[in-house]
Image: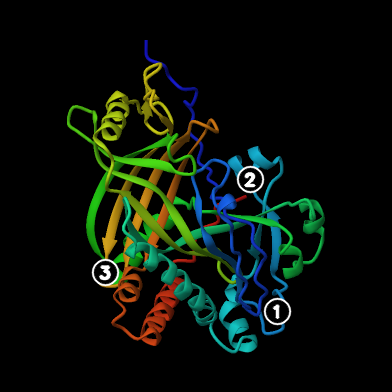
Amino acid sequence: MAYIPPHKRHSKDSERPSPTPEVLVPQFKRNFNLRSSKHNVDRSGKIVYADQAISRWLLAGIDDDNQFPCSVHLEPVSVELVGRRSGEKPLVLVNSNPANENDELRENIWRSPWESVAENVWPDLLSSFVIVRNKMECVNLEEVKPSLVARFGKILFNGSPSCGLERVRKDKVAETTLRQLRRSFYTNIPSSYMKNIVSGVVPMIGFDHVDEKEIFHVKLSDSNRPDSTISCKCSVKEDKTLELYKVELNQVRQMVVDVSCVHKNLDLRLMLCSKRILTALTDDEMHSIRNLIDSAVLDPEVKGGLRWPLGKSNSGDGYSVVGVWHTTAKSYKSPLLRLKGRHADRFDFRAGVGETTIEVVLKLKRIVSDLQEGKVETDSILDMFKDNLKMIWDHFLCSDPFLA
């Protein structure tokens, strides 16, 4: 008799945890958060930060006196997974009058927000990329591929031992108060946003449609790699079974910069990460992994879309299924960028929770390739970075309200 995990209902909420560094002050002073190796994995083991990962928070669009516009305030929002874990609603920054953005920026800010972000992120991006490039040159059992991505959503502010949310809501919004709160980045955006990007932004920017893929990501724990999660990418064959085509370790985050865009209704995350593709698995390891994949049963009624017969979700020699993602994604590309719109259905077996999300990811691929080749002056790459951020500012940070 097949065992059916207890995850029949789908949730539309999503949380993306991030580390809790000291917040960067509004003047964009540099602030590093160097993490030791014993702290570089979150509790679930899904998110890995490099030993010297940089994590920062920027406030973009406030005036030269570092004051929030009077129209900006904090509001509690319902996000199921966050509330389930913390017991209280997180807060988001909301601008009740964003229509005055251009006037306020011209009067009170001497340079554009995207220029400020680009110029202050740039030194950290360069130093982080040097670390990634050094890892790529090492001979090991992994193929390392760097990527610089932009994610779109809302920064969630959560209470901390030193600062409760109830007190924060009663106070005037201030950077010093927000500094004391924990943060996460919520990337589940409304379907109307995805539709606008695909039907409006894609043709206007000049993206070409590349492909549409349906992928199952089977997440495995490995007793030989306790600090990593193995991700097995699988396509679906005609007989409704899975075909394994790539085995990766969870990506390593080298730099994460979250930007609160107070004159927009979406925030921005810029992230430099490295994908680690396993290239030297033994025959026995591949045999164990393939047995787990072959045992999976496609079931659209369960979260993640896969289930395993009783006793078949572990290999007996160190591998166990700990989660599954079912994603359908459309990809678009231009000479400089790659855009992906993704519907994801996830289930985490360890936490016993699932989620369905709609996400948009923009890869700044030309910047990475130019940095990697080292043949282009960094000032020219910085100008390209500024152009990319201006394009993001103009076209990717507007959305219908979706958190309440």
* Residue 320, above or below 378: above
Is any part of residue 166 visible from this angle? yes
Viewer-nearest of discs 1 and 2: 1
Measured as percent of width and height from the top left, residue 351 is found at 55, 33
**Residue with the mark numbered 3:** 334
Image quadrant where one finds the N terminus: top left
State yes or no: discs 3 and 1 in contact (Cβ < 8 Å): no
Measured as percent of width and height from the top left, residue 67 is found at 72, 77
State yes or no: discs 1 and 2 in contact (Cβ < 8 Å): no
Pick the residue in front: 336 or 18: 18
The circle on residue 66 is 1
Labels 1 and 2: the sequence-earlier one: 1
Q: Secondary structure at mark 1?
A: loop
Q: In this rendering, would 42 be left or right of 223? A: right
Labels 2 and 3: the sequence-earlier one: 2
Q: Amino acid at mark 3?
A: Ser
Measured as percent of width and height from the top left, residue 167 is found at 82, 55
Q: In this rendering, would 16 be left or right of 252? A: right
Q: In this rendering, would 201 be left or right of 44? A: left
Residue at image location 53% in from the left, 83% down from the top: 112
Measured as percent of width and height from the top left, residue 198 is found at 33, 59
Neighbourhood count class around disc 2 (C-alpha, 10 Å): few under 14, some 14–19, many 20 upward: some
**Residue with the mark numbered 2:** 78
Q: Amino acid at mark 2?
A: Ser
* Residue 121, above or below 249: below
Q: Secondary structure at mark 2?
A: loop
Residue at image location 53% in from the left, 50% down from the top: 16
Cα distance, mark 1 to mark 2? 29 Å
Viewer-nearest of discs 2 and 3: 3
Residue at image location 65% in from the left, 80% down from the top: 27
Cα distance, mark 2 to mark 3? 37 Å
